[in-house]
Image (cartoon, rainbow, N blue to C red):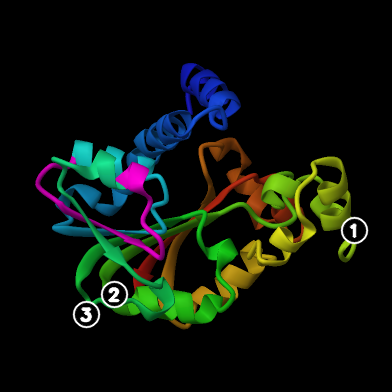
Amino acid sequence: MELKDFKKLLKLAALRKRTVEDYFLFQRFQASQIIKDLERYNIHNAKRFLDIGSGIGGYIYEFADRYPNTLFVSLDLNPLPFAQEKYKNKNIFTIRGDASKAPIKDKSFDFVFASSVIEHVDNQDDFLKSISNITSSIAYISFPPYYSPVGGHSISPLHYLPGELPFKIYSKFYRQKYSSFKNYGLVKTTLKSIESLAKPHFQILEVKPRFFNTLKPLIKIPVLREYICPHIEFFLKVN
């Protein structure tokens, strides 16, 4: 990532929680940078592209804007009205459903994309198996490793504390109901765990940090790699 792009990323990240529109723009910019890597895996030739857990839709919107001849489908448990409004007049369609039990025929998509989703999935093996059935070619999986500085999501850096302590502290100081964290759905997801789960279903083409390619040599170092990279990308090819 070039310096000017990094500065823009930081600016958008700082503003992302201000409004839904700001978060949408933050996602769109990230997608514009991710495309540079997806091009190496022939995203431009994809006829059908599935985005799992699209949320507010910034990623899929940017992809659809770049590739108007590709059919884009958003798979979400609870499609958001904000995203549905954005998708109007775009080559984007929505399916409501669970990716682990996707209501989709096998090999229906050339490309499957899931950014910051797998760390919220309880049965990650079923999730990856389902993706391997859906795609005829390439899958992109990305997530913040649990032990990275942002691996705890909204409770970071409290996630480094043991047991239930992070949730109790967060709920006290941020006035967040403790019960909501019991349903937060954050699974301790690491590079090692995803590598192990992916291998039976995919050929792992590449594992790299998102945006920060200078850190790539470090992800070959056991233990350290789980802490050093804020976001990891897996490029997978179905077996």
The numbered mark at residue 134 is 2
Question: The disc labelled 1 sits on which kind of residue?
Answer: Leu
Q: Residue at x 18, y 56 (%)?
A: 46
Q: Nearer the viewer, mark 1 or mark 2?
A: 1
SS class of the residue under badge 2? helix
Magenta run includes residue 174: no
Question: The disc labelled 2 sits on which kind of residue?
Answer: Ile
Label 3 vs label 1: CA separation?
43 Å
User: Local crowd at mark 1 within 10 Å, few (<14), some, or many (≥20)?
Assistant: few
Tell me the quadrant of the picture where the C terminus can be found.
bottom left
User: Local crowd at mark 3 within 10 Å, few (<14), some, or many (≥20)?
Assistant: few
Q: Which residue in the structure is indicated by mark 3?
A: 105
Residue 111: percent from left, percent from top: 27, 61
Label 3 vs label 2: CA separation?
7 Å
Camera-nearest residue between 53 and 7: 53
Q: Residue at x 53, y 64 (%)?
A: 118
Camera-nearest residue between 102 and 235: 102
- Measured along the vertical axis of the image, is residue 148 above or below residue 26? below
Q: Which residue in the structure is indicated by mark 1?
A: 165
The mark nearer the N terminus, 3 or 1, is: 3
Q: In screen coordinates, is 211 left or right of 220? A: left
Quarter holding residue 133: bottom left
Residue 121: percent from left, percent from top: 55, 70
Residue 98: percent from left, percent from top: 40, 73
Quarter holding residue 79: bottom left
User: Local crowd at mark 2 within 10 Å, few (<14), some, or many (≥20)?
Assistant: many
Q: In screen coordinates, is 92 left or right of 146? A: left
Question: The disc labelled 3 sits on which kind of residue?
Answer: Lys
Q: Nearer the viewer, mark 3 or mark 2?
A: 3
Query: Which stretch did the figure color magenta?
Result: 67-83
The mark nearer the N terminus, 3 or 2, is: 3
Q: In screen coordinates, is 119 left or right of 39? A: right
